[in-house]
Amino acid sequence: VELSLSGADRDFAEEARTWLAEHLTGDFARYGGVGGPADDEAWEVRVAWDRELAAGGWLGLSWPVEYGGRGLSLRHEVIFAIESARANPPYRASVQGLELLGPMLLARGSAEQKRRFLPPILRVEEFWGQGFSEPGAGSDLAALATRARLVKGKGPGRTGGGSPPRGESAGGDEWVLDGQKAWTTTGNHAHWLYVLARTSDQPRHRGLTMLLVPVAQPGVDIRPVRNLSGAAEFCETFLRGARTAADLAVGEPGDGWGVAMAALGTERGTSLVAQQMGFAREVARLTEALTAGLGLPPPALRYRLVDAWMSARVARWQVLRLMETVLADGDPGLRPSVCKVFASSFHQRLGALAVDLLGAAGQVTGPGYELSEIQRTALTCVAESIYGGTTEIQLNLIAERALGLPREGTRR
Amino acid sequence: MNFDFDEDQEELRSTVRRFFSRSSAEADVRRLMATDLGYDPAVWEQMATQLGLHGLAIPEEYGGAGFSFVELGVVLEEMGRVLLCAPFFASVVLAAELLKAIDDEQARKDYLPGIASGATIATVALTEDDGQWRRSGIRLRAVQDSGTWRLAGAKTFVPDGNSASLLLVVARTDSGVGVFAVDGDAAGLSRQALPTMDQTRKQARLEFDAVPARLLGGPGDGWPAVSRMLRVAAVGLAVEQVGGAQRALDMAVEYAKLREQFGRPIGSFQAIKHKCASMLVAVESMKSAAYYGLWAAAAAEEELPVVSSIAKVCCSDGYTLVTSENIQIHGGIGFTWEHPAHLYFKRARSSRVLLGGPDYHRDLIARLAGIMPEDAADAQDAEPDQRP
């Protein structure tokens, strides 16, 4: 099924489909659907696929031409996201740069920052990591404690043009950061971090600044954290006197909260498309494994498999409906949250079902904790109600912003 | 495909909403649900003639307006929202869609204009004592006796079976399943209204004692048309459930903002907030499934079998959940007869059962999805499309 597309849109979809058919071959096809927001499986293949997309001109479709984009509309992003999801490529490696940092810079970055940082994202040369969460600031992001202070330098400030600064001051004013960041997704691959840090003594949301910080310097130490599936796709990041140029604050110093929210606010759900359209394939694989190996499943399991099969489709319709809203008026409101809550709870039921369907054999891994795809799903799905804002936070947002319920602790 | 309703469809929605806010307020629902007839003939007449609701999805050549099932869906959603008490679903969805699906041009010419104008109230009599909506449940016999078909047996749980003037009876003949038209006042037919738990939807038991009937289409090829009608009707029911669920959610949220305990609105407590937000997630998934179903009913026949069952399951479970949570959020007052919460709670239950419960539809999905072989023993005829 398709979104209803007309004329030029249909041609564009057709062009995308043809290109995907020609290029999504070999390893790219073999690793179709591999990887995810909490899974850095087959990283090299995924990077190579992103580069293939870059070479074909499919990254940054809606980004301005001067920064290496195609200057097309959000409409084209949506159409391509759907076509791509249907073709089942490996999961994007450069999600952080493409979906979060890039849109944030486009919305709030200086011309110089855009010129410096956007093209390498689209060429898949520089990867980004997010420095928001901290050990003491998870859902309560405004409680973050990482500090940054501006110190006087001896010469002209640098803008990070050319090769990444090495931590040695080039002589200009610099920000110096101290603190610890947590859950830096794909931080082990990152060249740069976008860090939310406290730059004044004002409490909570006030006095925060968004800083772009190069990784390759002594003051930045990124250590992989092994997650429960054995993979090490997220990291803890230690900032000890880490330095970055004064002009690498995004937006005004003190306005970091607004910048961060703008970044998250541009999340229109296009990144949900690939994930949620892939669910149906997982269910199909499970069904296949099941009917091939064990024959007719007992009624109780069958019932749950039907639930999964059905919910995968509903999740897909949800995301298509979301895309249609985006195409129509651009503002999806809290629909992405709704999609995420629905999909994560369904996917976790699917994970639980996988364990039951696989039975005893499913409890045996390969050597070195090597997991089958289904086993990996069964384990990594638990993160889906945590990353990108926990289900509890999403429900709060839905309740307060979509339903207008009063904030916690409201007294008359 | 299209989930969003266009301007004309939204205009239709607001017209219908305005009309029902005057003619189907809670007091009207309570008044009508306590009557045997179960609807207001004056309102019925206005719906048909002034608003043209009955004929929306009936082709122009049969006296309708020739719109698609999507427009009818908009109307059904609004009806669900106000718990409209009227034989609309039975007449305009079940009966009209069966007539549209059946291979009998003369029957369409004879019956659809009456349904479109509201002059005829029609229904489909399918279920028997086992309450099943499947082919194997059809036991009522139709036999030809010197050129006249006659029906013998009983149908029960027939939606609006007491007020209908035209009954489309699904019966078993020597050559399979056939559909027969029977006059509401035919000789040998006795009708008995059934007191229903959901009083907003009337049901009747019909006994047939050699009742003369008119065969529509061939004597053994009625089931594919019935099956097609059941698919479309499941989608229609799903959007009706969406309307009711949205209303139940609205009621819960409204109350959570007003009701204070511990010196604050209960809606400021996370336990209540999360309940309300989860209700919204359920309602949104219902909408995605039901609206996709409307689109499939209007434009993607090949997807309709599985999509209609998904919509039925998703909306039945969602409506059930949302109407239960609405009562929980209201607390004691929600458990009273006086409060409208129970009207929605009960409508959710009757809708769940109507056209086959979620488990039956899960069975259908299991077959269509290849999770269970088509010929699995316990469901010989659960997939209604496959056999005559």
Image (spheres, grey):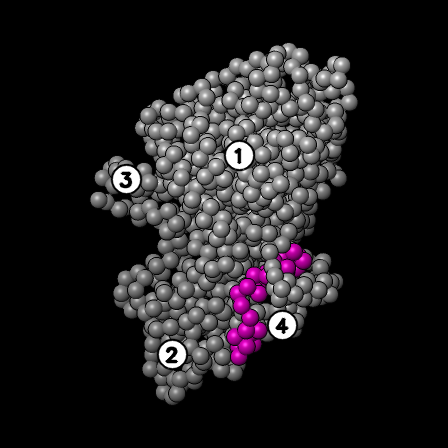
Q: Mark 3 points at which residue?
A: B258
Q: Are marks 3 and 2 on the same chain?
A: no
Disc 1 marks which amino acid?
Answer: Ser
Distance from label 2 to label 4 (Cα)?
A: 33 Å
Q: Which residue lies furthest to the right in this view?
A: B175
Real-space CA distance between mark 2 and mark 1, rounded to the nearest whole angstrom: 76 Å
Chain part drawn in magenta: A64-92
Distance CA(mark 3)–CA(mark 4): 54 Å
- Between discs 3 and 1, the one toward the N terminus: 1
Q: Name the residue under label 4.
A: A57
> Vertical placement of B227 versus A67: above or below?
above
**Chain ID at mark 1:** B
Q: Which of marks 3 and 4 is in front?
A: 3
Quarter of the image with the C terminus of chain B is top right
| Residue at x-position 42% and y-position 59% | A133
Check if mark 3 and mark 4 are on a common chain. Answer: no
Identify the residue position indicated by label 1 in the image.
Answer: B117
Q: Residue at x 42, y 30 (%)?
A: B42
- Is residue B248 visible in the rendered image? The answer is no
